[in-house]
Image: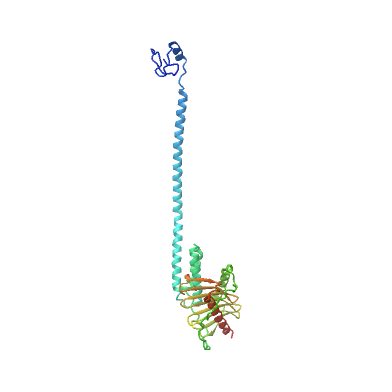
Amino acid sequence: MFCRKCGESLPESAVFCNKCGEKVNTQKTAAYNQTRPAKPVGLIIVAVVMAVFAISMVVVGIILVLSVSSFRDVTVTESVLIDTPEIEANDQEANDLRMRISNLQIKNANNGDITQKLIISDHLTRASEMLGAGQLDDVRIIVERCEAFVINPAAPDTTAAPETPAPATPAPVTPAPATPSPQRLPSVPGNRIENEVNRIRTLWEAAVNGKANGSYSSHVVASGVTAYSDRGQVKMIEAARGVSHANYSGIYLYDDGRLIFAFLEGADAHRLYYYDSQLFRWRYSANASNPNNSVNYDNDFNSSEFLRWERFALDAASDLYSRALR
């Protein structure tokens, strides 16, 4: 029988409940036992099924997470394997171009054509800068053009007229000291300098090409001095070392009779950019054979050295231009 208060199972002879202490009424307890509802077995079964289902869903979720993670790892690995050859190819090409630029700089240092030497030097400097920016296609084009000139130079022109005796060459000119002029206004403001430099480079390349392909006429001005003209206008004058300066050879570029660029080369090198007869950029290389280490000085009118080279190139260019027109 069972306790009618707590439901504890009791022996038939029990007077009190062993669990709750309730006095056992034999007659009422018997009636209670006959009417006591059965335990909810169905609910227990449902709870067990739901627990098993929940555990199954957790296991399935874990399997799916692991599967997605593995797929992602495989995808990333495949992506790396796919991209790696392209990256390695770019690195290899960049190293190859870097080596070719270095070889060209070494060979160009011994280039006897100073005009060609200067333009190739500028091209190689630009190529090095573009290589650092990853512009491999543009660098390859520049390198191939330079190699065509340095490795396979055009044959010298043997049909040129022999030089005629020239007047005595004046004594080499030493640039005179100049006084800084801090009040001067620049002819080319700082934000326009690069545009003007590129414009001058375009005119420079046109003059170099005109000389190379024979479209510019040439005549010897004096011993060591040659002028190149286009339709009667002097565009460029080359002066050997010792003509204008004992230690420098010079190339002077003109536009409508005015100096716009001068290149002076000795142990060091000076590239001088002019606008309206005023120097706006002095590009100095302490080592003429290594233009990559050049330094730009823009509108530096407080520097006596800046003004000294401005004046010297202007005077030399003016003198040579006047002699070329005679």
Is 11 displayed left or right of 148 in the figure? left
| Residue 227 appears anywhere in the view | no
Q: Which of 223 and 177 is in front in this view?
A: 177
Residue 182 image point, x, y percent: 57, 74
Residue 57 image point, x, y percent: 46, 35
| Residue 226 appears anywhere in the view | yes
Task: Tell me if residue 57 comes above or below residue 317 in the rendering.
Answer: above
Residue extending furthest toward the top = 27
Is 268 displayed left or right of 258 in the figure? left
Residue drawn at (45%, 58%) of the image: 87
Check the picture and name the quadrant holding the N terminus: top left
Residue drawn at (45%, 36%) of the image: 58
What is the total number of numbered labels drawn onto the structure image? 0
Residue 28 image point, x, y percent: 45, 12
Check the picture and name the quadrant holding the C terminus: bottom right
Task: Tell me if residue 32 comes above or below residue 319 in the rendering.
Answer: above
Residue 31 image point, x, y percent: 46, 12
Residue drawn at (47%, 70%) of the image: 293
